[in-house]
Amino acid sequence: MSLLECTGEIFKEKSYRQAVKGTAPAAPTRGCQALPGEVPALEAAFAQAQTAPSLAEGRRARHSGSGLGEGELPAAPCAPPLPRQRAPSSPTLLPRASREGDSSRQDRGPSPHQDCGHPWTAGRLSGCADSHTRFPQLPEGASLLWLCTPEMAAPKVAVVGAGVIGLSTALCIAETCPSCSVMVLSDQFSPNTTSDVAAGMLIPHTYPGTPIHVQKQWFKETFTYLFAISNSAEASEAGIHLVSGWQVFKNTPKEELPFWSDVVLGFRPMSEAELQKFPQHRFGQAFTTLKCDCPPYLLWLEKRLKATGVQMYTRKVADLWELHSEYNIVVNCTGIGAHQLVGDEKLFPVRGQVLKVHAPWVKNFIRDGDGLTYIYPGIHRVTLGGTREKESWSLSPDPGATKGIFDRCCSLEPSLRGAQDIKVKVGLRPSRQCVRLQREVLSQGGVKLLVVHNYGHGAGGFSVHRGTAKEAARLVGECIAALQGSSSRAKL
Ligand code: FAD
């Protein structure tokens, strides 16, 4: 059965649960490893889903279930509006709205087709102008065919974590699967995440365990996405802007052309005249890239999520198993929190301390090629960095490090001696050899839980967040296809 054949079927959460649910899990376990061989039906469905067309391909491909050809529409496949979601039962679950007095955060948002009278339309969107307003990234003529059939219940997806990875992943899922009911659960939201501390520069960090072409693709997708925002009227609110500057080296690096050099704009070696500004450095690269001012960008993502109908709740998840009775799929975007949540020993903190200063005359970024010293001007503040302390879990500012950062940055840009209002921030980079971007079937006592992991972005989460979020959303699509396969087999 292919992904598209699935779309013709009724997704029956109840029958899925009956099919997979034997007894309730005895006691939550740490580590949550899938047990090979225990979940043949779902794994087989996964295998089939992987050979099925991707979401984008699926939109173009033939809809065998309804006999539709490429680009054709089902006649009038509008489902009734989704019922309002029941309130979460856990006492630890606080609507994010209640913290901020924004009651609309609790509501399931409007269908993307509310205004045109097609609550959950399957088919081409070109006849529905509003869909492209709400989902501007959809290519002209693209359809939301996937998973939007009349009788289908909404698959429930919990995204755990509200840093840049959790919020962008939830947004990608909501955009690619508008019939999903998506909820973000997190113990902290902006401004209290690691993502709020980051400088937010789009200069990739290299993941040794991930093929370079994959990293480049993630970076390119992220750059393209943010570049579009930087060229829109939303740029200021989203905190996204272009910034030009220099990466300087005391010795010529082995790799003079980094893999991302043709993604950023105007990458070139620095001229002799430019290098005169940096008497201790012999070589340099000049380019223009993007910078996110992180807290505004996170708030902008939250606003987009709200507009797309995603709910956000404050909740600490002690074990992914605690979500199995409420959600069909759980997406783990907990950053360094995954070390404890899923017992990932490969994940370790790299402590980073930065200063956020007022120095509005600094307009260009300067980065020492060793990655340790950097000056990144944002819209309101300049970020001065930094430190990299492997395996340090301390979130307390270190006064010695503050002085060291300030002195190093002043040696690169002496005018910073006049900086004012110096604030110190500390964050733990969720580091791994490679980002954990994969799905997993957890199984316990005959009960299964579908999980997609998206964490471990280390020093480069902002640089690749949109690319990895898109991939995570694609994996969620595979999970839904697998659930539908499981459900239809249970019916037979
Ligand atoms: P986080 O932002 O930590 O989010 C994790 C979320 O999960 C939080 O909301 C947390 O509350 C929640 N959570 C965790 N455990 C649980 C649980 N059990 N239950 C419920 N919720 C849970 N990257 C760049 O690309 N460019 C830069 O210039 C840059 N500069 C940086 C500077 C510093 C000093 C640091 C520290 C990092 C920098 N980074 C940069 C890296 C970037 O910040 C990270 O890669 C990115 O923020 C990781 O995002 P995340 O969403 O995975 O993690």
Image (spheres, grey):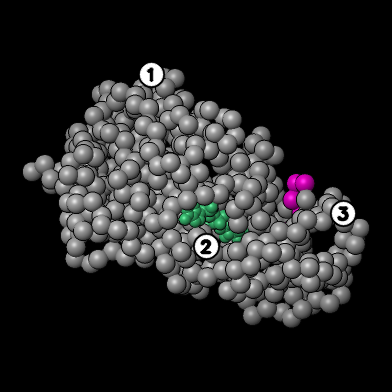
Name the image quarter holding the C terminus.
top left
Is residue 124 shown to the viewer in this render?
no
Magenta stretch holds residue 244: no
Judge left or right: residue 21 versus residue 81: left
The residue that disc 2 covers is 336
Mark 1 surroundings within 10 Å by alpha-carbon count, few (fewer than 14), some (14 through 19), many (20 or more): few
Mark 3 residue type: Gln
Q: Mark number for residue 117?
A: 1
| x then y, percent, for residue 412 | 83, 68
| Highlighted range, magenta | 376-380
Mark 1 residue type: Gly
Ligand 1, by image quadrant, is bottom right
User: What residue do we see at 26% from left, 28% from top?
Assistant: 150
User: What residue do we see at 78% from left, 50% from top?
Assistant: 381
Under circle 2, the secondary element is helix
Q: Is residue 320 above or below residue 82?
A: below
The residue that disc 3 covers is 420
Under circle 3, the secondary element is strand
Q: Under 8 Å from ligand 1: the CB of mark 2?
A: yes
Is residue 179 shown to the viewer in this render?
yes
Report the Cα–Cα distance between label 2 and label 3.
32 Å
Judge left or right: residue 167 versus residue 381: left
Mark 2 surroundings within 10 Å by alpha-carbon count, few (fewer than 14), some (14 through 19), many (20 or more): many
| x then y, percent, for residue 70 | 28, 37
| x then y, percent, for residue 17 | 21, 45
